[in-house]
Image (tube, helix red, strand yellow):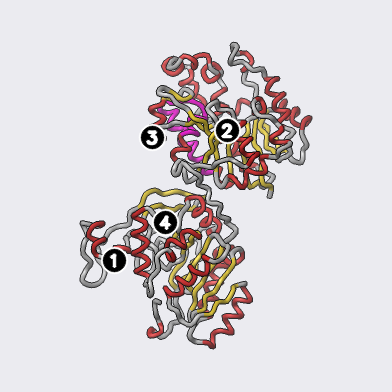
Amino acid sequence: MSSITLVTGLWDIGRGDLQEGWSRSFQHYLDKFAQLLQVDVNMIIFGDEELEKFVSNNRRNENTQFVRRDLSWFKNNEFYNKIQKIRTNPDWYNQVGWLTESTQAKLEMYNPLVMSKVFLLHDAKILDRFDSEYMFWIDAGLTNTIHPGYFTHDKVLDKLPKLVKSFHFVCFPYETSSEIHGFKYDKLCDLAGGEVNRVARAGFFGGKKDSISEINNIYYGLMDSTLSSGLMGTEESLFTIMTYKYPSLITYSEIDGNGLMGKFFEDLKNTTVEVKSETSKDVVINNLDTSKVGLYVITFNSPKQLEVLIQSMLDYDSDFIDKPRKFLLDNSTDLSTTPRYLELCEQYGFEHIKKDNIGIVGGRVFVAEHFDETDLDFQIFFEDDMSFYPKKGEVCRNGFPRFVNNLYQKSIEIIQKENFDFLKLNFSEFFGDHSVQWSWYNTPQDFRQSHWPNNPKLPVQGLDPNSPKTKFDEIHIHKGLPYITGESHLSNWPIVLTKEGNYKCYLETKWAHPFEQTLMSYCYQETVKGNIKPGLLLLTPTEHNRFEHYDGALRKES
């Protein structure tokens, strides 16, 4: 896999014919493009037949992928006519003095081209023969304002993987009350969800290759809705909205008010770039390493249960066995099972940790303590009877899929992207599901009365058919896997936690003899306070499968 690929393109749209101040010859662009072509990283380049000849004369074939695409391509979509309708409307180009003679207003192909950069980046992702990990759009003429030495001498691009965890823009401060690039300011603020005081630049942007499809979908929908409403600026107007609306997916860094990208590359050179998001307005990259994962399994008196669980993982997604460090907490009282447990640990690469029935929740807290002392960043927890259900095409009783491809990697990426403290893997569980807020049964009575004034009392016995529902916020999709934010409860069902989430849920506050209900109640109250951020997959990949039973008198919580 190649780490970074640059994506770019160049077409002659007649800018040399504009009046002074707006005019640039195509030869000027070719001269600057020739400088960019000297950058020694993989490049995917879009352009016509003449540009292909130019590229072949200025660059090696082995790190170049040229995609022939004539200017006519930008007309063959649903946006071209909408753009022309707005561009030629006096109400649009007369809204501010500078706009009348601008490239946007005067050039038929300017906005169709610049507003297609995300689409070209997405096409590059699909066509990529370099198997890239990161892909960034870079304007063909960027060296007009950026010294090429940043790329050829300082090698600043090599620093991007440590900086960008998803998708990244560069922004500059912008104060206005009328419009941004021709996009009405009040409408832009409405779409951004509040006051806008920065603009995202379009000369350089991008990130992880696997984030591009989601960005493309968001951008496509935003472009379609705004153009259909008669609203248009440039691609930067839409990028700006996205930095405000999608902070879990998009980060940004800031440059000076002149809008010149040189500061970003200078900061990149000096390793002083601050990565921000709209949520925190501060450094948000958590620097968690998605390769540092620990799988913990707690087991009791049944090597066969463990064997079936492991086989279900191999059948469902072998990454659960192949990728993480693996720990088995053997809580068994029947010591005759130890030799077989040791065999399984040797066969599948588990570290065997022997305890003498410290309880289900006692074992769960021990796992939290053990994980906290490792150098791992993510914990996946399973009990030995929570096997995967590897049958494609089936759904659970709530209608959610039982199977999804690449669940291991997608789950780690989701919790990383959203900065979740924990991510529950199952919507449906054995006794219930996440449509009901199970914490209601376990919180202190004073909290229950204040937080659920319409449901202040527990039933005398059994379950309450009118118990409070779980409060959810937003549904998102990552690589085809849907998940939801909100107030998902903590339980001992399969779960992924970050190092910080593990500490918050199990170690920040401790009890002498905790029960699962105790931890569920505590974590829900912390969630309501905003101290814990949970997530939930809209999926039911595992099921309770206890087929070897033991004496109930041996069961203990802690």
- Name which of mark 3 and mark 1 comes first in the sequence: 3
In the shown orientation, is residue 169 left or right of residue 150?
A: left
- Name which of mark 2 and mark 4 comes first in the sequence: 2
Pointer 2 residue? 117
Helix or strand or loop: what does disc 2 sit on? helix
Helix or strand or loop: what does disc 1 sit on? helix
Tag 2: residue type? Lys
Tell which of 479 and 173 is nearer to you.
173
Helix or strand or loop: what does disc 4 sit on? strand
Residue 225: in magenta span: yes
Residue 396 drawn at (x, y percent): 41, 62
Tag 3: residue type? Gly
Helix or strand or loop: what does disc 3 sit on? loop
Pointer 1 residue? 441
Q: Is residue 399 above or below residue 479?
A: below
Q: Is residue 354 above or below residue 532?
A: below
- Counting other residues with Cα less than 10 Å from the Cα at mark 1, is it few (<14), some (14-19), or many (20 or more)? some
The boundaries of the magenta stretch are 213-240
Cα–Cα gap, marks 3 and 1: 38 Å
